[in-house]
Image (tube, rainbow, N blue to C red):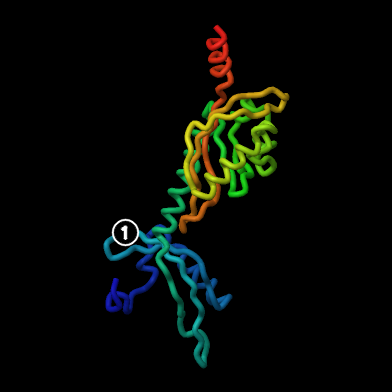
């Protein structure tokens, strides 16, 4: 709608029919409080609904209220992007919780911020014992810890993804397990590194089989 289209239009007529019943309540609210802000759905000239964020205030004349002055901005795309992000995260959670591999996320300091339930089978720790408590280097063998930390530092610095990184970790029961990890960097909208997300598989049986074959 252009300026000419808007003149003499009632905002109520621009609202989807299912929301028009709420208009009188909105007017009572602004008369009582002198202002109102929130989100409203309006129908554009092309017939498509748009989500608008508004901030309005009551205008006064010598004899009392004479109108409403305000501002509004279209946030439809922003809302839809957030909804898609939520759906994407929900799908990720569903896949992660049903995966046999350990699905994890860590922040830029190497602190685990997410671990699916498979971590308990692989390392003996529950997700609650991992998230926000354990750093990636905690589980490395002492003699391999420095090498693994340097690898992590290089990856973080260069924002590189890695694939099938094989190393040994200590299980909660003290046993040594062989793991294979792959990960990708998590970047914000400005391309800044926020952490890593990846999967880790237990390859201990495979390594034992390889050792037996070598022995034979």
Helix, strand or loop under label 1: loop
- In percent of the image, x 48 and y 38: which residue is there? 162
Q: Is residue 126 visible?
A: no
Residue at 43%, 48% (x, y): give it. Answer: 84
Q: Residue furthest top?
A: 216
Q: Position of residue 161 (x, y in %)?
A: 47, 41
Q: Which residue is more in the foreground, 199 or 181?
A: 181
- How many labels, in total? 1
- Measuring from the top left, give residue 75's x and y in whole percent: 42, 62
Q: Residue lying farthest right?
A: 173
Residue pictured at 27% horizontal, 78% vertical: 4
**Split into 4 quadrants, where in the image is the N terminus?**
bottom left
Residue occupying the point 49% across, 73% down: 55
In the visual, does 135 lie left or right of 105? right
Front position in the image: 177 or 126: 177
Residue 168 appears in the figure: yes
**Tag 1 residue:** 48
Where is residue 41 drawn, in percent x and y?
A: 41, 62
Q: Where is residue 197 in the image (x, y as percent from the top left)?
A: 52, 41
Near-viewer residue (120 or 157): 157
Q: Nearer the viewer, residue 115 or 43?
A: 115
- Disc 1 crowd rating (10 Å Cα; few below 14, some 14-19, many 20+) is few
Q: In which quarter of the image is the C terminus?
A: top right
User: Which of the 4 image quarters holds residue 79?
Assistant: bottom left
32 versus 77 height, above or below:
below
186 versus 207 height, above or below: below
Q: Quarter-wise, where is residue 29 in the image?
A: bottom right
Vertical order, 215 against 26 (above or below): above
């Amino acid at each position: 709608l252009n300026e000419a289209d808007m003149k003499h239009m009632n905002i109520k007529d621009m609202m989807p029919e299912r929301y028009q019943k709420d208009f009188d309540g909105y007017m009572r609210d602004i008369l009582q409080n002198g202002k109102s802000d929130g989100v409203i759905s309006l129908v554009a000239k092309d017939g498509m609904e748009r989500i608008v964020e508004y901030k309005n205030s009551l205008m006064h004349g010598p004899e009392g209220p004479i109108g409403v002055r305000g501002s509004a901005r279209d946030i439809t795309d922003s809302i839809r992007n957030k909804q898609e992000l939520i759906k994407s995260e929900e799908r990720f959670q569903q896949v992660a919780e049903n995966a046999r591999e350990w699905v994890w996320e860590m922040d830029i300091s190497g602190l685990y911020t997410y671990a699916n339930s498979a971590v308990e089978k692989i390392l003996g720790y529950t997700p609650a014992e991992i998230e926000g408590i354990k750093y990636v280097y905690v589980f490395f063998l002492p003699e391999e810890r420095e090498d693994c930390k340097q690898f992590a530092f290089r990856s973080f610095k260069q924002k590189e993804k890695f694939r099938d990184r094989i190393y040994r970790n200590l299980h909660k029961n003290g046993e040594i397990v062989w793991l294979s990890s792959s990960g990708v960097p998590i970047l914000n909208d400005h391309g800044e590194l926020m952490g890593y997300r990846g999967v880790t598989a237990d390859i201990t049986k495979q390594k034992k089989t390889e050792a037996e074959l070598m022995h034979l």
